[in-house]
Amino acid sequence: MKVRELIQVLQTFPDQDATVVIGEGEKPETWLIVSGVAECRIARVSDDHAIVGSEPAIEIV
């Protein structure tokens, strides 16, 4: 997915205040390849960790 396509998809979500979550996979800081996005709910554990919760979020996968 190209950046322009990702932005267009994110703009269609009704909750524009949702947190964006990017999954690192097994090798963080190597590549960011986006295959899609999904609505989810999270709870922040720290600045860089979250678990399933009630806060609206958009997961970039």
Image: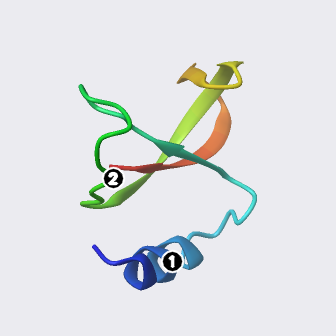
Q: Is residue 4 above or below residue 27?
A: below
- Label 1 vs label 2, nearer the camera: 2
For marks 1 and 2, the one nearer the N-term is 1
- Amino acid residing under circle 2: Leu
> Which of the labelled discs sits on residue 7, or is there none?
1
Quadrant for residue 56, please give it. Answer: top right
Q: Nearer the viewer, residue 54 or 28?
A: 28
Residue 13 screen position, x and y as percent? 56, 69
Residue 51 screen position, x and y as percent? 54, 19
**Label 2's element?**
loop
Mark 2 is surrounded, within 10 Å at the Cα level, by few (under 14), some (14 to 19) or many (20 or more) other residues, namely few
> Which of the labelled discs sits on residue 32, or is there none?
2
- Amino acid residing under circle 1: Ile
Q: Which residue is drawn at 44% across and 84% down?
A: 4
| Total residue callouts | 2
**Label 1's element?**
helix
Q: Nearer the viewer, residue 24 or 56?
A: 24
Residue 6 screen position, x and y as percent? 42, 73
Q: In this view, does 22 lie above or below 42?
A: below
Is disc 1 in contact with disc 2, using a CB cutoff of under 8 Å?
A: no
> Which of the labelled discs sits on residue 47, or is there none?
none
Tell whether 16 sits left or right of 7.
right
Q: Which residue is drawn at 51% across and 77% down?
A: 7
Q: Residue at x 58, y 78 (%)?
A: 11
Mark 1 is surrounded, within 10 Å at the Cα level, by few (under 14), some (14 to 19) or many (20 or more) other residues, namely few
Q: Quadrant of the N terminus?
A: bottom left
Q: Residue at x 28, y 31 (%)?
A: 25
Tell whether 40 sits left or right of 28.
right
Label 1 and label 2: CA atoms lie apart by 15 Å
Q: In this view, does 46 lie above or below 30?
A: above
Residue 15 screen position, x and y as percent? 68, 62
Tell whether 45 sits left or right of 61.
right
